[in-house]
Amino acid sequence: MIIGQIKNGIVLDHITAGMGMELYNKLGLGSLACQVALIKNAESKKMGRKDIIKIDEAIDIDLDALGYIDESITVNIIKDGKLFKRKHLEVPERVVNILKCKNPRCITTTEQELPHIFKLTNREKKVYRCIYCESKGN
């Protein structure tokens, strides 16, 4: 299988195998006018199997959302056909509008213009809680 090199864009590497399609959908990559390649179950010396997404355009990506979904992802920024910058993700301390509070008594239920903000309360178990009502995020 041959997938061409990109000139300017982003390569999301080291995605946990099977998570590529979820990222594709969450990032809204299907609505882009540029070329996007999703490679599933690629062989990896580090991970055994991994997914890769190549985007042939420089777009804004919410790194906190990526880190929340899969902190093992490496973000490679490509300029003029060469690696310009590499970012390794971590579990973010807080996420905005990625999780939605399910508590019917939370202020975000009645004040719908408020952002849904969750803070990390347990790094090991990746537990987030709503900053308004302390409900656990899913």
Image: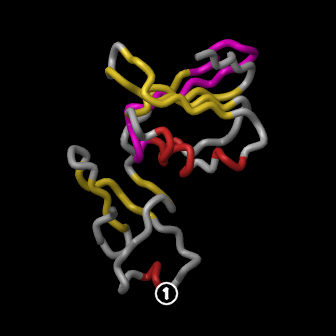
Q: Does 74 appear in magenta?
A: yes
Residues 88 and 72: in front is: 72
Give the residue furthest to the right.
33
**Quarter in which the C terminus is drawn:** bottom left
The coloring applied to the image is: secondary structure
Quarter where residue 107 is shown: bottom left
Seen from the viewer's position, the closer of residues 26 and 75 is 26
Residue 76 % position (x, y): 57, 24
Q: Is residue 69 above or below residue 41?
A: below
Total numbered labels: 1
Side (left or right) of 138 relative to 61: left
Q: Residue 46: which quarter of the image?
A: top left
Place of residue 17 in the rendered image (x, y in percent of width and height, measured from the top left): 39, 33
Secondary element under disc 1, as helix, strand or loop, is helix
Identify which residue is drawn at 68% across, 16% down: 5
Residue drawn where x is 39% and y is 61% of the image: 118
Report the amino acid beneath label 1.
Thr
Residue 72 shown in magenta: yes
Q: Which residues are magenta?
A: 67-85
Q: Is residue 96 above or below residue 4?
A: below
Is residue 53 positioned above or below 47 on the image? below
| Rendered position, 8 above or below 83 | below
| Quarter of the rendering occupied by the N terminus | top right
List x then y, in percent, for residue 9.
Answer: 69, 28
Crowdedness near tag 1: few (<14), some (14–19) or many (≥20) residues, C-alpha within 10 Å? few
Q: Which residue is mark 1?
A: 110
Q: Residue at x 62, y 31 (%)?
A: 37
**Residue 72 location (% of width, % of height):** 38, 32
